[in-house]
Amino acid sequence: MHSELKVSRIGTGIKILDEALPEGIPRNNMVMVVGEGGTGKSVFLLQLMFSRLSMGEPCIFVCFDDTPLAVEQNAIFFGWSIKEYVERGMLKFLDCYSFRMNPDKTTIPKYVVYVENPRELYQLTQILTGIMDDMEMHGRGCVFVDSLTELISITEPAVAIETVKTWRAECAKERLVNLFATFHFGIKPYDDFEQILEYVVDGIIDLRYNPILMQQGLLVKQFRVRKMKGSPHITKWFTFHITRNGIEAAEESSH
């Protein structure tokens, strides 16, 4: 009988999320954070990144929705100083947003890799995996993508889907590096592609507003772990607030 092949798991560092994932997330999982606008997807991603950095693990943040500077400013708002980590070479940004602005390349910080044409997805994948190898991201570290919705919007959706499959294979499966990515729920042209992505990824964290309280005009945020391959997880809805400290538990929700 062959011995069982085990992949190590790691906690998220977000207390309420770790309650839903009591044994952590397998290092070979790609996880998608899905929700409509304002539910906290980007904050989840940012806090997950800061938690990994705090654990001493290297990270790459792939920016499609905003500039690296805006991501840094958002981190500062929550008191998450990333300056130390960029100076130590533990954090790199892959800038797939600023091509719209034709930036002055001489002013781009060393920890930001500017992508002139992110629509060239094969080249983008080569850049990403090259950075991972330079940072020795094998069995440690994490890649964050914000967002897959924007990736699909700038190229042929079918090509974007194949790229996501490649990233899952080359990052999560080959290198045992978690990959977290956001997807904006409720954009009609992309509904079909969302279903494909949900099939492709290993884990899904759903974000929403409590539907009962919405009827009363209240926007109360909730999340659930819908699936997580290779790890036990609680699938109930957890209620949370976004405070100056990030994601924090709130009063228990209606399920």
Image (cartoon, helix red, strand yellow):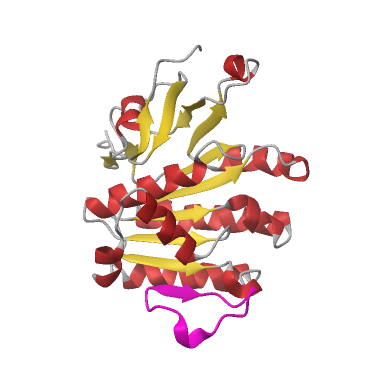
Percent from the top left, x then y, of residue 63? 52, 61
**Magenta-highlighted residues:** 101-117
Q: Give the residue drawn at x 73%, y 44%.
A: 190
Q: Quadrant of the N terminus?
A: top left
Of the pair 159 and 238, the residue shown nearer to us: 238
Relative placement, left or right, of 171 versus 99 is left
Residue 231 at least partly seen: no
Residue 36 at least partly seen: yes
Q: Residue furthest right?
A: 189
Of helix, strand and loop, which mostly describes the magenta segment? loop
Relative placement, left or right, of 50 versus 226 is left
Q: Give the residue drawn at x 50%, y 11%.
A: 254
Q: Give the residue drawn at x 58%, y 22%.
A: 218
Of the pair 60 and 2, the residue shown nearer to us: 60
The number of discs equals 0
- Asked if 83 appears above or below 189 in the picture, the reply is below
Relative placement, left or right, of 74 versus 163 is left
Q: Residue furthest top?
A: 254
Q: Quadrant of residue 61?
A: bottom left
Q: Residue furthest bottom?
A: 106
